[in-house]
Image (cartoon, rainbow, N blue to C red):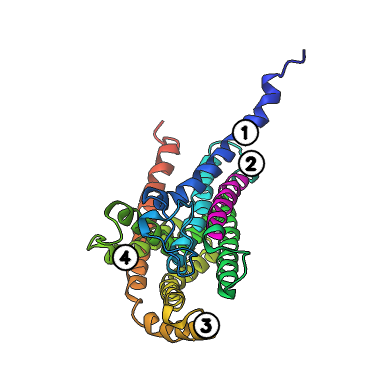
Amino acid sequence: MTEISPAADQPARARALPFAIGVGGGVLGILPWLIGGGMLPLQNLWAAATMPEDMPFVLLPLSQYFATLLFSVLLLGGVFAGFALHFVARRRAVALWPAALGVLLVHVIAVVQSFAVLAGGLGLGRGGDSRVMLYFAGLLGGVIAAILLAQLGFWMTSRRSVGVVALGVVLAAVPFGNWISRFFVAVTGEVSPPLFLPDLLRWLPAVVVGAALVWCGVRPAWRIVVWVVGLLALWILPALFTAIQYGLGMRVLDGNLPEMAQAAVQVFPMVLAEVWLPVVVALVIGVVGTVVRMLVERDRTPAVVDQGAPDAAV
C-alpha cells in the first residue's frame, strides 16, 4: 500500500485553504439575502396567484425590483474572497485559482437553484406570454455579467499590490453600501426599515472610499489614478444604480425596453446632480488621512535611523 508523504500532501492543503476562502466569500456575499428568509420576491408574470409568504425559497433575489441588490451580493462574493486572500498571501504562499473556483462554485449553485425555481413558477417552456422568456433571459444575462464582474473583483482584490487592491475596493464601495443595508432590512423587514438606512446607504460608501484612499496613498504616482477612479465611481455609481432601478421598476411600461431605457436616461442626470456631497467627504477623508499618515511615517523614520546608527562617543 502506497503511503502519502507529508511533503506530497502539502500542495493539497495549500489549495484547500484558498478554496475554502473562496467558498466562504461567495456565501458571505449572499448571506444578507439568506438571513432575510430567501423567499423569492413576488413576480409579475408568475403562473399562479401566490401570496408573498408562500413564494418558494431561492438563493438569489431574482426580480427586476431587486436588480441592484442582486448585482451587489454576487459582486461582493468575489471581492470578499479576494480581499481576505490578499492578507493571507502576505504571510504564506497560496494559490489564487482555487479561491476563484470556490467563488464560482457558490455562484453556479445559487444560479442553478434559483433559476430552476423561477422557471418552474413562470411556466417557462409551456408557451403563452413571450414576456416570460424575455424576463427570464434578461435576468439570467444580468446575473452572468455580475458573476464575471465578481471574478474580476476577486482577481483585483487578491493581488499583492496595495494600489490594485484599493482600486477594487473603491469600485465595490457603493455595492457594499447596498449589501450592508440589506442586513438591516433582513432583521427589521422591508415593511419597516430603519430610519437611518438612507443615510447609511449614502455615507458608508464615502467612508469606505476615503479609508481605501488613505491605505492606497499617493506613491508611486500612478496611484493617483485610484483616487480619480474611486471618486468618480462614488459619484456616478449611485446615480447609475438609481437610474437603472427606476427604469426596471417602471411596471406601467410593461416590459417596453426602449421606454424603460429612456426613463433611466432621463433620471440619471437628475440624480447625478444630487449625489456629489459624499464625494467631497471621501476626498476630505482621503487627503486628511494621507497627510496624517505621511507625517507619522516621517516622524517614525528618523527614530529608526537613530536607533540603527553607531554611537559616535564610543
Quadrant hosting residue 22: top right
Which residue matches tag 4? Answer: 203
**Magenta span:** 100-119
Which residue matches tag 2? Answer: 95
Q: Is residue 105 above or below residue 276?
A: above
Per the model, the C-alpha gap separating discs 3 and 2 is 46 Å
Q: Secondary structure at mark 3?
A: loop
Which residue matches tag 1? Answer: 14
User: Which residue corresponds to the image point at 41% horizontal and 72% vertical from the top-left?
Assistant: 238
Camera-nearest residue between 208 and 34: 34
Which residue matches tag 3? Answer: 256
Which residue type carries mark 1?
Ala
Per the model, the C-alpha gap separating discs 3 and 4 is 34 Å
Of mark 1 and mark 3, the one earlier in the sequence is 1
Q: Answer whether labels 1 and 3 touch (C-beta < 8 Å).
A: no
Q: Answer whether labels 2 and 1 touch (C-beta < 8 Å).
A: yes
Q: Is residue 218 visible?
A: no
Q: Nearer the viewer, mark 3 or mark 4?
A: 3
